[in-house]
Amino acid sequence: MSDVPTNSPETFGTASQLGPASAMTTINLLDSAPDTDPQRPRPGVQRVLSADGANLILFSFAPGQSLPDHKAAHPITVQTLRGQLNFTYGEETVALTPGTIVHLPAYEVHKVEAAAADSGSSIPAILLLTMLTK
C-alpha cells in the first residue's frame, strides 16, 4: 500500500500552541475543536499543540465524513472526546466512544469514519489524535 498517504505533524498546519511557553500547557479541547463543513467529505482539522514528544491534532467529524486509508509517520493514539467514530485497522473495526483509546505504531494503515447522517445525531464527533514524536 505504498500509495496510501502518510501524515506527519506538519500535514495538519501550524499549532495554536507551539512548544511550551512554560512547563505546563492547558487546552480546553472541546472549545478548541475546529468547525467542520457537512458538505465536505473530510472532517475539520486543527493542530492545537506542538510540544516535546507529542503533537495534538483535533478533528471534527460531521455525520458521514471520513479519513480514508492513511498512515502516520509516528506512533499515535486516537480517542473520541465526543460522539462515536469507527476506527478500522486491517479487518478489525473498533467503535471509538469517549473513554476508548487506540494506539498504533508508525506507518500502520488505518481509517476513521463517522456514522451516516441517518444515525440520528447531527452534533460533530470530536477525535483527538496524539502523534508521539519521541
Image (cartoon, helix red, strand yellow):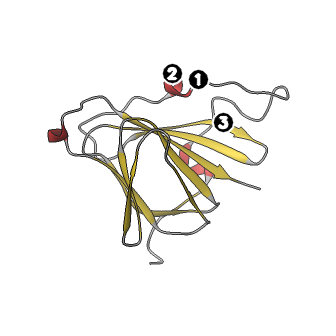
- Mark 1 burial class by Cα count in 10 Å: few <14, some 14-19, many 20+: few
Tag 1: amino acid: Asn
Give the x, y percent position of residue 46: 52, 36
Give the camera-side residue of 23 and 83. Answer: 83
| Residue on which the image places disc 1 | 28
Tag 2: amino acid: Asp
Q: Secondary structure at mark 2?
A: helix
Q: CA distance from mark 2 to mark 3?
A: 14 Å
Q: CA distance from mark 3 to mark 1?
A: 11 Å
Q: CA distance from mark 1 to mark 2?
A: 5 Å
Question: For residue 19, what is the image quadrant?
Answer: top right
User: Which residue occupies 68% across, 53% down?
Assistant: 132
- Name the N-terminal-most of marks 3 and 1: 1
Question: For residue 24, what is the image quadrant?
Answer: top right
Q: Which mark is residue 49?
A: 3
Q: Disc 2 or disc 3, which is closer to the eye? A: 2
Q: Quadrant of the C terminus?
A: bottom right
| Residue on which the image places disc 2 | 31
Q: Is residue 20 left or right of residue 39?
A: right
Q: Which mark is residue 99?
A: none
Give the camera-side residue of 77 and 50. Answer: 77
Query: Pointers 1 and 2 in contact (CB under 8 A)?
Result: yes
Q: Is residue 129 left or right of residue 95?
A: right
Q: Quadrant of the N terminus?
A: bottom left
Query: Pointers 2 and 3 in contact (CB under 8 A)?
Result: no
